Image (tube, grey):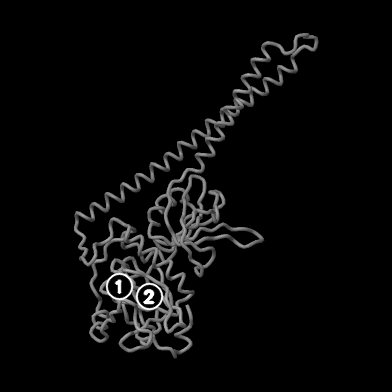
């Protein structure tokens, strides 16, 4: 089903406490769930909701192997190791979606079943329409600013005509006039100075309008591939796109006319590319739980440059906003719960002796 399509997946290993062994597989993040499926059986070894996560940490097992731990409600601790490309990338992505889900007003209540009714669906539709109207208003405001800029251009032309008139008057001034400047020349110079000041003020106003922020969303950002995903933010401005880090330091600016392609991989992941001849292209990848809010603006501003990939088709059947997932535990979860009881970690963490020291290199490779 489309709701099971992962937003992102990473190969790695999961520690099965009851069997005291690591199992290789794939860790997947969906809109509401975190899952780990075995490579051998293709069955789900563990699955839990984002809303049930209490803590995400980077730890070490047996004082040697780097791991990522997720503490679930009920003091249930999950250990993940050998994550590719590395555990820091996985931590940044999981922590981003978990935090944004906690901050989202539409997030499901802890431990409660979320049963969407027709009324809630209607409210979601109205809210989505309201957001799109707001985005349309921003774009119309931008178009109004463009008309203002056109008027300012006409005023500049008028100012240039005034300067030309001044030059003509200079040529027409008689050389025998003994009292300095002619009276009409003084008036013309004053008008030219006023026009120059007005042109400078309009240019300053134009610059401030170009730097107006239309949308700003938190995101996990990487330049190039997905091996270095770091927290940051994406700013959609009237004339450009800006990439900033968590300290609001500018990493890169894409001017509007420099963007060649915006590739949409999913409602939560896009790639912005600028092509060059004779040198490598510049492209940034953005992964954000708030990406649907920015996409409505990007589609209007860069309509001809937005390209939807085949990966995006898997998400078309469900809303772009993160809805409550109404599914219960699947049969794999029930089967695994019956065969392997969940491990309850003590307050100080699991015993180090429960984590095997001698593991196959392919499993215990440091993340």
Could you tell me which secondary element the residue under label 1 belongs to? strand
The residue drawn where x is 55% and y is 55% is 252
Give percent across and percent down for residue 306: 47, 55
Task: Give coordinates of residue 297: x percent, y percent.
Answer: 42, 49
Q: Position of residue 17 (x, y in %)?
A: 32, 85
As measured in the structure, the alpha-carbon distance from the residue carrying label 1 to the one carrying label 2 is: 10 Å
Q: Are marks 1 and 2 in contact (CB under 8 Å)?
A: no
x then y, percent, for residue 191: 61, 19
> Residue sitting at 63 percent across and 19 percent down?
190
Name the disc covering residue 69, or none: 2
Depth check, front residue: 263 or 138: 138
For residue 2, what is the image quadrant? bottom left
- Dot 2: what SS? strand
Task: Determine crowd level at label 2: few under 14, some 14-19, many 20+ residues with C-alpha closer than 10 A.
Answer: some
At horizontal 38% and vertical 75% (from top left) the residue drawn is: 69
Is residue 175 depicted above or below 106 in this figure?
Answer: above
Furthest residue to the right? 176
Residue that appears at 26% across and 66% down: 325
Which corner quadrant holds the N terminus?
bottom left
Q: Which mark is residue 54?
A: none
Which residue is the site of mark 1?
72
How crowded is the residue under tag 1: few (<14 C-alpha within 10 Å), some, or many (20+)? Answer: some
Q: Quadrant of residue 359?
A: bottom left
Residue lying at the far front of the rendered structure: 348
Q: How many marks?
A: 2
Side of 43 where 237 appears, left or right: right
Q: Is residue 144 left or right of residue 318?
A: right
Q: Residue 154 lies in what quarter of the image?
A: top right
């Amino acid at each position: 089903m489309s709701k099971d399509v992962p937003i992102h997946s990473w190969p790695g290993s999961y520690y099965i406490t009851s069997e005291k062994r690591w199992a290789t597989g794939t860790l997947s993040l969906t809109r509401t769930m975190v899952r780990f499926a075995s490579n051998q059986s293709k069955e789900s070894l563990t699955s839990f909701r984002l809303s049930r996560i209490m803590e995400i940490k980077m730890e070490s097992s047996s004082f040697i192997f780097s791991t990522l731990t997720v503490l679930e409600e009920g003091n249930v601790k999950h250990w993940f190791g050998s994550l590719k490309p590395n555990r820091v990338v996985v931590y940044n992505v999981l922590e981003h979606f978990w935090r944004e889900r906690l901050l989202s007003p539409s997030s499901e209540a802890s431990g409660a079943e979320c049963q969407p009714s027709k009324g809630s669906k209607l409210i979601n539709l109205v809210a989505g329409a309201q957001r799109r109207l707001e985005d349309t208003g921003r774009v119309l405001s931008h178009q109004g600013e463009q008309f203002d800029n056109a008027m300012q251009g006409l005023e500049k032309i008028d100012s240039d005509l005034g300067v030309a008139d001044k030059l003509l008057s200079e040529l027409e001034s008689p050389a025998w006039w003994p009292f300095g400047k002619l009276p009409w020349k003084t008036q013309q110079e004053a008008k030219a100075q006023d026009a120059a000041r007005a042109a400078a003020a309009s240019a300053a106003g134009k610059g401030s309008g170009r730097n107006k922020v239309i949308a700003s969303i938190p995101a996990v950002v990487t330049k190039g591939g997905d091996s270095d995903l770091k927290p940051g933010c994406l700013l959609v401005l009237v004339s450009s796109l800006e990439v900033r880090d968590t300290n609001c330091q500018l990493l890169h600016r894409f001017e509007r006319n420099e963007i060649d392609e915006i590739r949409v991989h999913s409602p939560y992941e896009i790639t912005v590319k600028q092509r060059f001849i004779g040198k490598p292209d510049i492209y940034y990848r953005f992964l954000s739980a708030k990406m649907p809010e920015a996409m409505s603006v990007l589609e209007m501003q860069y309509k001809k440059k937005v390209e939807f990939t085949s990966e995006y088709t898997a998400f078309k059947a469900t809303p772009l906003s993160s809805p409550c997932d109404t599914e219960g535990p699947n049969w794999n979860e029930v089967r695994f719960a019956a065969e392997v009881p969940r491990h309850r970690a003590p307050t100080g963490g699991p015993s180090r002796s429960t984590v095997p020291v001698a593991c196959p290199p392919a499993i215990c490779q440091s993340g």
